[in-house]
Image (cartoon, coloured by chain):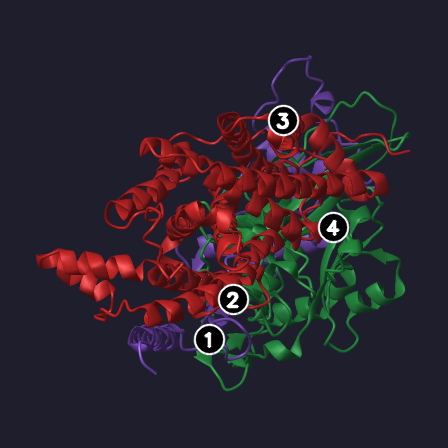
Chain colours: A purple, B green, C red
């Protein structure tokens, strides 16, 4: 057809753009994409492969046998060591101790579970700490108030 | 197996976890054919025998989560454990604990100071409070998930075992998924600028461990089940008890079930 | 039993995720789609009185289309990964269609403008020397055919493109509305009316922008304003503004009438949180006043002078531009002021001045299209050639 040269040219140009886009896209898709679904499968492998921070339950008993046995017989038996202490990986690396375990002696740690709250199930052992210590109103609770009476032995096997 | 009798929140998964003690040192480097992940190392059991290599096949699991509201004491151990395990940025939450006070006239007073991470203080409410309770929350890992559905680049996805996960390398940070989650389970990570959320500790599950929140819950208010495991206790409870889901009207088909949960919970 | 509850937000819900940039984005795409519709009214539906604005509206559409991605890039956590949306578009997501819809629409607009201006481009190339000649020859793709036959072919293709452009523009903007309407977690967004509301308000904003641009441009060039053209635009504007406002009200009315659970949060939202921007700016100032003003222009045509009608139309169109912006603001920001808990509100959002998602960036983005139009006008006239040199291409 006459007088359609420019139409053919622009059609060709658009075709080239299209081919470029399709090819470019093809090379930019990550390798493992779509292997199991519409996602990068390697992302799943990476997520699954991350190192755990908390140890397996009762890992501590490996070395701290006595404490573990005492705790297993006490009221705190259902509380994992890492709830009150720090995580295993802050203390053990490649099956060996590499750093001291941080010990939290604050009354706040106890208060997390035992401060009296209306929303807590009634069966839970709970006290109003300020009242329990017979503090005057407005007095601050001493930092290690709980441990002064309830010592470590007491806590592991109350 | 005395542990099983003394801790009523023990699941089969916990038992496995106990067997795979020391798994913290495991690397998950080999990636076998199909979906099976095979760990390179062998692991020692508690009695010293060698187990492994530990094999994990995502297609052989489908996790369910059970929350017993009546058992939650609001200690926030789960929130702190999650933060340590997953390096969650401050003031953002992969799991959290809410507190509800409901008055005689149905007025709802809810709060969740810092997601319950720092515990709760007594609260003075000038009303006749007739019920109050704590509610743990986390990603529901919905089967009919609205967030992964509308991720434009396939960065949010559902894993073979039904976990809703985020590929941090492909996420463009548009926060559409944050808008789409009806449960407020997602956030944009302030450092990576990508969507971030609960992974149900899939890096622990793949090594036979349970999630950080379940493991560190002192009362068994949080439990993990596996509907593809035979005789799973959690699955049995869900099948036989009066459970409820959050926002069931949205038909997202959550995998977190709540027992003893009052209707005021959002 | 249901008293109003205490303010409670989900702990992850303290932030407004979608900022001023996401308000701007649908506003700009709305202008794009609306301006295109104006040009199609002329090219496809033969509204010949709109000839003075046919070219202007195409170029305005293109200029805004060129910056439509900018607010998104400014908003993204990882703008460098933006191409992921076309590399691995996840088609269950409304957002993933963006790349394809945007690409197709961009090509369509560019080709149509190219065909409209082909004659001028070739003449310009022949008049010029050096780089300028080389550049415009390349733009003409090296074909210097401006015979009547070739222009007749161009004309036929322009009509087809303008016609195809109507669904394309509708999809471009309808999908933006769908992006909000499909978020079932959000009580304020989740309605099938959303794409339609966005679409009609897009056309409204597009026509309004062309009215304002045309009047300013003609005044600047000290030319005669075509009274017929402004009158016709005012009529279309009146129609689309009325439809838009009806739909916007319908959404709220049906929510409140049904007294669904959504209304428990949307009601207080409208009454307390966005009362000024919704009831005040969007509805009373932005809708009622232009409705009356344009009504005067439309109904009392014979009693008013051309100048008066032009002035009234100009004022009404300017207000409608604000109305549509207010509507985008109310949808995007209003929809995020409340928490997913359904019983709590965030603090009101005030955009920052500087920064990636601030007011400064917004002004910059909105300025660029006008610079593009100025540059374009420098070489190729935005207003049609004077009478007597009628070109078969149009």
Judging from the image, mark 1 belongs to the subunit labelled A
Front in this rendered view, residue C372 or B221: C372
Instruction: Categorize mark 1 by other alpha carbons within 10 Å: few (<14), some (14-19), many (20+).
Output: some
Q: Which residue is mark 3?
A: C289
The residue positioned 73% from the left and 38% from the top of the image is C249
Q: Could you say which quadrant of the image residue B211 lies in?
A: bottom right
**Which residue is outermost to the left?**
C130
Return the x and y of residue C151 as percentages of the image width and height: 35, 67
Give the quarter of the image for residue C291.
top right
Q: Are marks 2 and 1 in contact (CB under 8 Å)?
A: yes
Q: Is residue B134 above or below residue C268?
A: below
Cα separation between marks 3 and 1: 54 Å
Q: Position of residue B3 (x, y in %)?
A: 72, 63
Q: How many marks?
A: 4
Residue at 55%, 30% in the rendered image:
C316
Residues under labels 3 and 4: Cα distance?
A: 63 Å
Q: Are marks 3 and 1 on the same chain?
A: no
Q: Are marks 3 and 4 on the same chain?
A: no
Give the side of residue C57 with respect to residue C202, left or right. left
Q: CA distance from mark 2 to mark 3?
A: 46 Å
Q: Are marks 3 and 1 in contact (CB under 8 Å)?
A: no
For mark 4, what is the residue?
A: B219
Q: Which residue is mark 2?
A: B154
**Structural crowding at the residue carrying mark 3, measured as other residues with C-alpha within 10 Å and reported as few (<14), some (14–19) or many (≥20):** some
Q: Quadrant of the N terminus of chain C?
A: top right
Q: Nearer the viewer, residue B132 or C130?
A: C130
């Amino acid at each position: 057809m006459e007088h359609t040269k420019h139409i053919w040219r622009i059609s060709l140009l658009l075709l080239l753009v299209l081919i470029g886009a399709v090819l470019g896209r093809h090379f930019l898709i990550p390798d493992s994409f779509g292997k199991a679904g519409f996602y990068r499968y390697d992302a799943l492998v990476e997520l699954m492969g991350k190192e755990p921070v908390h140890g397996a339950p009762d890992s501590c008993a490996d070395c701290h046998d006595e404490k573990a046995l005492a705790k297993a017989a006490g009221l705190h038996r259902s509380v994992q060591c890492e709830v009150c202490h720090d995580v295993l990986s802050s203390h053990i690396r490649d099956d060996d101790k590499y750093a001291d375990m941080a010990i939290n002696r604050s009354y706040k740690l106890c208060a997390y579970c035992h401060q009296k709250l209306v929303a807590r199930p009634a069966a839970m052992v709970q006290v109003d700490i300020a009242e329990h210590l017979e503090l005057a109103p407005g007095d601050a609770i001493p930092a290690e108030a709980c441990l002064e009476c309830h010592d470590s032995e007491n806590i592991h096997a109350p | 197996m005395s542990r099983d009798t003394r801790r009523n929140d023990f699941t089969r998964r916990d038992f496995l976890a106990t067997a795979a003690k020391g798994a913290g040192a495991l690397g998950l480097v080999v990636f076998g054919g199909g979906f099976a992940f095979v760990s390179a190392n062998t692991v020692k059991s508690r009695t010293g025998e060698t187990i492994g290599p530990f094999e994990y096949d995502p297609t052989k699991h489908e996790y369910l989560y059970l929350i017993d509201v009546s058992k939650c004491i609001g200690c926030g151990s789960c929130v702190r454990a999650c933060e340590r395990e997953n390096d969650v940025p401050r003031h953002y939450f992969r799991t959290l604990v809410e507190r509800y006070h409901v008055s005689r006239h149905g007025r709802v007073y809810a709060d969740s100071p810092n997601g319950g991470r720092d515990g709760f203080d007594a609260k003075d409410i000038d009303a006749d409070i007739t019920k109050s309770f704590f509610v743990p929350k986390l990603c529901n890992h919905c089967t009919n998930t609205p967030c992964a559905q509308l991720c434009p680049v396939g960065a949010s996805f559902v894993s073979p075992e039904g976990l809703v996960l985020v590929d941090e390398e492909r996420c463009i940070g548009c926060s559409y998924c944050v808008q789409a989650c009806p449960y407020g389970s997602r956030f944009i990570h302030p450092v990576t600028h990508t969507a971030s959320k609960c992974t149900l500790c899939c890096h622990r599950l793949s090594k036979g461990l349970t999630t950080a929140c379940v493991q560190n819950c002192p009362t068994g208010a949080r439990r993990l089940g596996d509907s593809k495991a035979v005789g799973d206790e959690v699955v049995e409870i869900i099948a036989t008890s009066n459970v409820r889901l959050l926002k069931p009207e949205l038909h997202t088909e959550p995998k977190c079930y709540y027992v003893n949960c009052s209707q005021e919970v959002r | 039993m249901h008293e109003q509850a205490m303010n409670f937000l989900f702990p992850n819900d303290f932030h407004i995720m979608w900022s001023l940039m996401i308000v701007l984005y649908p506003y700009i795409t709305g202008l794009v789609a609306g301006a295109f519709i104006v040009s199609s009214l002329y090219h496809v539906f033969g509204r010949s009185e709109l000839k003075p604005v046919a070219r202007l509206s195409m170029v305005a559409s293109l200029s805004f289309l060129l910056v439509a991605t900018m607010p998104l890039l400014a908003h993204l956590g990882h703008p460098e990964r933006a191409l992921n949306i076309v590399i691995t578009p996840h088609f269950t997501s409304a957002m993933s269609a963006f790349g394809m819809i945007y690409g197709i629409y961009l090509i369509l607009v560019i080709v149509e403008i190219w065909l409209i201006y082909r004659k001028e481009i070739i003449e310009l190339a022949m008049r010029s020397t050096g780089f300028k000649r080389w550049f415009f020859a390349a733009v003409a793709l090296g074909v210097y055919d401006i015979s009547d036959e070739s222009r007749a072919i161009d004309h036929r293709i322009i009509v087809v493109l303008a016609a195809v452009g109507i669904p394309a523009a509708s999809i471009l903007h309808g999908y933006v509305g769908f992006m909000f309407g499909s978020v079932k977690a959000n009580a304020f967004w989740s309605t099938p009316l959303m794409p339609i509301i966005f679409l009609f308000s897009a056309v409204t904003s597009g026509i309004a922008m062309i009215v304002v641009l045309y009047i300013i441009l003609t005044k600047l060039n000290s030319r005669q304003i075509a009274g017929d053209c402004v009158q016709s635009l005012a009529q279309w504007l009146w129609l689309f503004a009325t439809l838009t406002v009806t739909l916007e009200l319908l959404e709220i009315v049906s929510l409140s009438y049904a007294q669904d659970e959504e209304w428990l949060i949307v009601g207080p939202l409208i009454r307390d949180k966005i009362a000024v921007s919704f009831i005040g700016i969007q509805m009373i100032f932005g809708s009622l006043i232009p409705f009356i003003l344009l009504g005067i222009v439309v109904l009392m045509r014979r009693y008013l002078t051309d100048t008066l009608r032009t002035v009234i139309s100009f004022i009404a169109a300017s207000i409608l531009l604000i109305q549509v912006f207010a509507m985008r603001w109310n949808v995007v920001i209003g929809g995020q002021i409340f928490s997913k808990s359904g019983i709590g509100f965030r603090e009101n959002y005030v955009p920052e001045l500087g920064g990636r998602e601030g007011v400064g960036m917004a002004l910059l983005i909105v300025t660029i299209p006008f610079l593009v139009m100025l540059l374009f006008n420098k070489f190729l006239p935005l207003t049609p050639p004077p009478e007597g040199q009628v070109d078969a291409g149009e």
